[in-house]
Image (tube, rainbow, N blue to C red):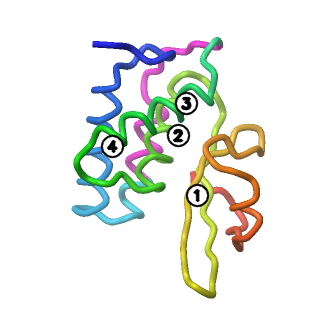
């Protein structure tokens, strides 16, 4: 099995995405966020050489292999957990577009979005504090 740059296999990311979807459906957003926070602070395999972009790229590749559509929230939560467990300070952010309603989640490292284009984020009303 091919491994991503941070040591996880694409299958591992797929499992994370499926688990995140199940948690969101079974427990709701607040409990899933709490679970993500707990998982992110667990025993970590710190690796300062991990590039955050490579993590979100691997999550996106894994999402493409799934028969279900892994939404931005699931992808962001999985990337957040992996990055935190690798010692990279990351946060999940949410924004909404009120007219033609749409909501979007992304991950930030050092205040910069790493899994999203800046022009999309500029169109959104961003919640004040990071969710995680």
Numbered disc 2: secondary structure: helix
Q: Which residue is mark 3?
A: 83
Numbered disc 3: secondary structure: helix
Q: Earlier in the sequence, mark 4 or mark 1?
A: 4
Q: Position of residue 73 (x, y in %)?
A: 46, 56
Mark 1 → mark 3, Cα distance in angstroms: 15 Å
Mark 4 → mark 3, Cα distance in angstroms: 15 Å
Residue 131 disc label: 1
Q: Is residue 122 above or below residue 36?
A: below
Numbered disc 4: secondary structure: helix
Pointer 3 with pointer 2, Cβ within 8 A: yes
Mark 4 → mark 1, Cα distance in angstroms: 18 Å
Pointer 2 with pointer 1, Cβ within 8 A: no
Look at discs 4 and 2 and give the one toward the viewer: 4
Q: Which residue is mark 2?
A: 80
43 falls in the magenta region: yes
Q: Which residue is mark 4?
A: 17
Residue 23 disc label: none
> Label 2: how many residues lie within 10 Å, few (<14), some (14-19) or many (20+)?
many
Look at discs 4 and 1 and give the one toward the viewer: 4
Q: Residue at x 58, y 57 (%)?
A: 131
Quick one: 112 or 36, which is closer to the camera?
112
Pointer 1 with pointer 3, Cβ within 8 A: no
Pointer 4 with pointer 2, Cβ within 8 A: no
């Amino acid at each position: 099995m091919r491994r991503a740059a941070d040591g996880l296999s694409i299958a591992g990311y797929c499992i994370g995405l499926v688990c995140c979807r199940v948690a969101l459906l079974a427990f709701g957003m607040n409990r899933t966020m709490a679970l993500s926070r707990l998982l992110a602070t667990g025993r970590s395999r710190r690796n300062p050489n991990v590039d955050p972009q490579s993590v979100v790229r691997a999550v996106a590749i894994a999402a493409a292999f799934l028969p279900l559509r892994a939404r931005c929230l699931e992808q962001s939560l999985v990337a957040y957990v992996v990055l935190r467990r690798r010692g990279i300070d990351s946060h999940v952010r949410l924004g909404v577009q009120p007219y033609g309603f749409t909501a979007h989640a992304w991950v930030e490292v050092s205040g910069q979005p790493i899994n999203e284009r800046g022009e999309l984020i500029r169109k959104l009303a961003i919640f004040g504090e990071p969710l995680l």
